[in-house]
Amino acid sequence: MLTKLTIKNFKKLEYAEFELERSVVFVGPNNSGKTSALQALSLWELGLRKWAEQRDKQAVITTTTINRYDIYAAPVPSVRQLWRDLNVENNLIEIFAAGFTQDKTWRVGFQFIYANHESINCRLSPESDALTDIFQNGLLEQVGFLPPLSGLAAIEDKLPIGSIQTRIGEGRTADVLRNLCWLVYEQNRWQELAQLIQDLFQVDINPPEFNELTGRLSVTYREINHKKSMDLANSGRGFQQILLIFSYVFFKTNTILLVDEPDAHLEILRQKEIYNRLTALVRSQQSQLIIATHSEAILNEAANADKIIAFLGAPVNNKKQIVKALTTIGFDQYLLAAQKKRIIYLEGSTDFMMLKAWAKVLNHSLLPYLINNPFVKYVANNPLDARNHFYGLKEAVPDLKGVALYSRLN
């Protein structure tokens, strides 16, 4: 299990440091760095695997090379795209992880150096523990990265595991959904998965079938009280998303699971149930779960039991502040504050309509701001509410600016 992760100069993240637990939720607005953090962890694991491969071939290793086609979780046309602000000159990407496995602790970090647009060189960080001891003791766990479901393919060829992992890393999850079902079936865990699907959807899902003549896989399901089975392609996107997540988790036991937007295509009540079932399953399999989400429903479920890291400018690890955001202010308010950087407090919606109309008559320079969906909070005639709200937001967004306007105060 990972207990700490440090990332420098990777994509959106100039510097980020996280304390991690068994279940972790990354939350924040779009383009804030949540997926970058998941991809960085996947790159760290790739560096570890490449280092292990080189160690089997030679006694002394200084660097190993990673081709951009091997970076499944972060596919890019040039590896330069992995560097923050594309700045590769005398600039290292460094990803450092600490954790424990089998009651033994370890610390391993890698530095990534730009070689050319096709490859990067990887070397061990000086502060790392000796990898020889770690490999011999088998202390490090696997990392599995799962993006959200894309459009499901109508037909699907049976693929080797390497091809399945490549397609998942490239975001082509719908190209391998039936293959993941097949892997669960081969591991004799199909009945567990089928029971979970029946509990959630009142649907009987049939074991996957392989046609040796065509080389293709098929999966069918039957709604309860219906006699005929339907092909998986006929099911809803939410059903497919859940089948993707849980087939992957059943297949990937004893793994650090990185799941990007597990709530995609799911309604609010389903989001809560899926998160609770997912965390319970991961714990039972001695795995670790790290997800990135926009879902307030999932955040509310995670607030009291799991680790939450908010991407609001710099990532925020303060759980007390995050719970405050969820229970008192509302996390959507934090997201708006981080995105807009400005807030207007008014008594009510009529005041805002008058401001816009007045700015229009005056052709005022602030008119574009007022008509472009600004962050407005209505607080009636109560400056104290505005003050508490503003300074609560400012804890997470230090550069937030605010104006409060009233027509009548006692």
Image (cartoon, rainbow, N blue to C red):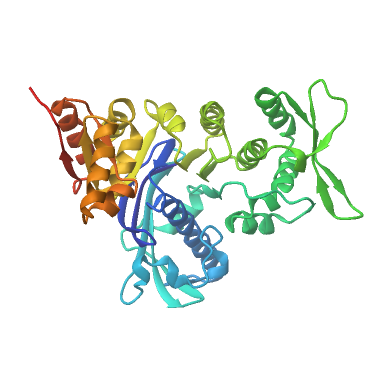
**Based on the displayed image, in which of its 4 quarters is residue 241 positioned?**
top right
Give 348 or 44, whichever is nearer the viewer: 348
Q: Please state the total of marks drawn on the protein image.
A: 0
Give 31 or 253, whichever is nearer the viewer: 31
Decide: is 49 above or below 345. below
Is residue 136 in view?
Answer: yes
Q: Name the residue located 34 percent from the left edge and 72 percent from the top edge.
A: 87
Q: Position of residue 15 (x, y in %)?
A: 29, 56
Give 200 or 207, whichever is nearer the viewer: 200
Question: For this view, does 355 lie left or right of residue 140?
Answer: left
Quadrant containing the N terminus is top left
Q: Position of residue 404 (x, y in %)?
A: 16, 37
Q: Name the residue located 16 percent from the left edge and 25 percent from the top edge.
A: 382
Question: For this view, does 82 lie left or right of residue 228?
Answer: left
Is residue 121 in view?
Answer: no
Q: Position of residue 67 (x, y in %)?
A: 53, 71
Quadrant containing the C terminus is top left
